[in-house]
Amino acid sequence: MSSVKCEECQVGRCQPVSLTYMRKVGEHMIVLPNAPANKCDMCGGVNFDPGFLLAMQTMLEKLAGDPQKSDRKKAPVTELPQEWIPVRRGG
């Protein structure tokens, strides 16, 4: 795949990478390794793949509304998944 110009810094080029996606839903934390994303080689900005985020939203809505899992607490899914930006440590 070819790189695209970073929308945040307008200088760097975004390269496809696999990163860990984390999202809090209710009292639970969802952690998915190897999520498709693009990361800027200059500013480090991260954008998760829109198709991946839509699939996550669809899956969470199905799980929240599944009557087969009525013995579990249902976490409300009222917002679109937000992009997670990793914290850079060190230099």
Image: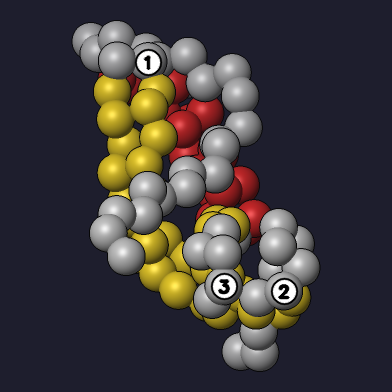
Dot 3 crowding, Cα within 10 Å, few <14, some 14–19, many 20+: few
Q: Nearer the viewer, residue 90 or 37?
A: 90
User: Which residue appears at 70% of the width and 68% of the height?
Assistant: 6
Q: Nearer the viewer, residue 13 or 20?
A: 13
Mark 2 vs mark 1: in front: 2
The type of residue carrying mark 2 is Val
Q: Which label number is shown at residue 42?
A: 3
The type of residue carrying mark 3 is Met
Q: Nearer the viewer, residue 62 or 86?
A: 86
Q: Left of 35 or right of it: where is 46?
A: right
Q: Which residue is mark 1?
A: 26
Q: Quadrant of residue 52?
A: bottom right
Q: Left of 40 or right of it: where is 86?
A: left
Q: Which residue is mark 2?
A: 11
Q: Left of 31 or right of it: where is 35?
A: right
Dot 1 crowding, Cα within 10 Å, few <14, some 14–19, many 20+: few
